[in-house]
Amino acid sequence: MKFAMSYSCGKDSTLALHKMLEQGHEPVCLVVMVREDADRSYFHGADSIMLERYAKALNIPMITCPAQGATYQSAFEKGLLKAKTMGAEGVCFGDIDIEENRQWEEERCKAVGLYPCFPLWQQGREEIVYEFIRLGYKCLIKSVNRRVLPMELLGKFLDEEAILVMKAAGIDICGENGEYHTLTIDGPVFQKPLVFQIGDKIEIGDYAVVDIR
């Protein structure tokens, strides 16, 4: 099946892409939601230059969908319609077990006539993190909830050492409740690794982010 990948640049959507490729499906594009007011991807904060590098590193065309909160749904559907013109028959998502999110995505796919795919669904949050690392993927911790995780994790790789810190904090190590977000920079589906630079750390309320370029 030809598919569009709803891509966040983080670990879960990268692993979902990995599994689709492993099953023999063909990606036609990446669909990435971008904050209009910040020129960065939603949730994971990749800027426009980094998004261009992702498309090249993965060797998959990218559709960026600028949006504000009120226009998020329509912008996403517009992006899916464009993916459909490129030959997409389905859309792949990296969701694991949050039913509300899946329902929203299924509704968007139904609206544009595409089949929704969830290769990670109900596989177990902890199992997914360890599989991601075992496969050889490398990703950086982009943001943390400061109420539950130390800022020292920002800019570090998601590895066994980081997981020990998360377990000691008593959080879901997959970060499905927003405890942290990541940017994947290398691994089996990458044609070449992303070259990056770690910048300043910024505190925003309960959260802290690091500028990765």
Image (tube, helix red, strand yellow):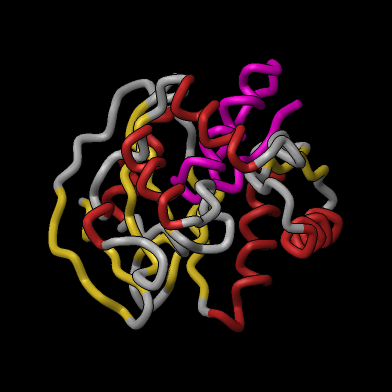
Rendered view: 159 above or below 41: above
Coordinates of residue 133 in the picture (x, y in percent): 44, 27
Q: Does 3 appear in magenta?
A: yes
Direction from residue 135 to residue 160 in the image, left or right: left
The residue lying toward the viewer, choosing from 131 and 194, is: 131
| Residue 48 in which image quadrant | bottom left
Coordinates of residue 21 in the picture (x, y in percent): 62, 21
Residue 28 seen: no
The residue lying toward the viewer, choosing from 100 and 68, is: 100
Q: Which residues are magenta?
A: 1-30
Q: Residue at x 30, y 69 (%)?
A: 208
Direction from residue 63 to residue 92 in the image, left or right: right
| Residue 151 in which image quadrant | bottom left
Q: Residue at x 86, y 56 (%)?
A: 110
Direction from residue 111 to residue 191 in the image, left or right: left
Rendered view: 91 above or below 176: above
Rendered view: 67 above or below 168: below
Q: Residue at x 27, y 52 (%)?
A: 153
| Residue 187 in which image quadrant | top left
Coordinates of residue 168 in the picture (x, y in percent): 41, 51
Q: Does 56 appear in magenta?
A: no
